[in-house]
């Protein structure tokens, strides 16, 4: 039964990652994305708490990477890959 739930959880995580990154790229200004990324990372350090989690660390890094010119294209490629697999 646990194996059956795993793909569903992976799918939900991938969809959440896609929608969050797409929202951040399309609706949040550049400086605010970095601040939001830092807040995600701080929340990730409290991963033992129920709502906050360790999942926030890589998402925070991705938000910060959207503002760095030399990493932005990699994040955009990642969003496109997620859109092909899990997009709306």
Image (cartoon, rainbow, N blue to C red):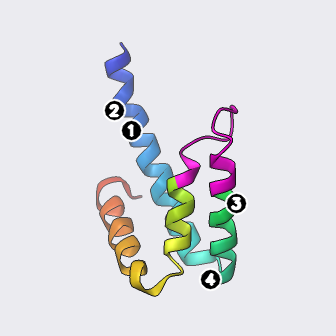
Name the residue beneath numbered marker 1: 10
CB under 8 Å between callouts 1 and 2?
Answer: yes
Disc 1 on helix, strand or loop?
helix
Say above or below: 49 vs 17: above
- Foreground disc of the pair 1, 4: 4
- The first of marks 3 and 1 along the sequence is 1
Say above or below: 55 vs 30: above
Name the residue beneath numbered marker 2: 7
- Foreground disc of the pair 3, 1: 3
Q: CA distance from mark 3 to mark 1?
A: 24 Å
- Foreground disc of the pair 3, 4: 3
Q: Main secondary structure of the magenta part?
A: loop
Residue drawn at x 35%, y 59% is: 82
Crowd around label 2: few <14 · some 14–19 · many ≥20 (10 Å): few
Residue drawn at x 57%, y 60% is: 60
- Foreground disc of the pair 4, 2: 4
């Amino acid at each position: 039964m646990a194996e059956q739930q795993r793909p569903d959880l992976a799918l939900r995580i991938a969809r959440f990652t896609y929608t969050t990154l797409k929202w951040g790229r399309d609706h949040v200004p550049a400086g605010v994305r970095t601040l939001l990324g830092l807040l995600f990372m701080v929340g990730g350090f409290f991963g033992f708490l129920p709502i906050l989690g360790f999942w926030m660390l890589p998402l925070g890094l991705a938000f910060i990477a959207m503002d760095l010119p030399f990493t932005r294209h990699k994040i955009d490629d990642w969003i496109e890959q997620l859109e092909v697999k899990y997009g709306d």
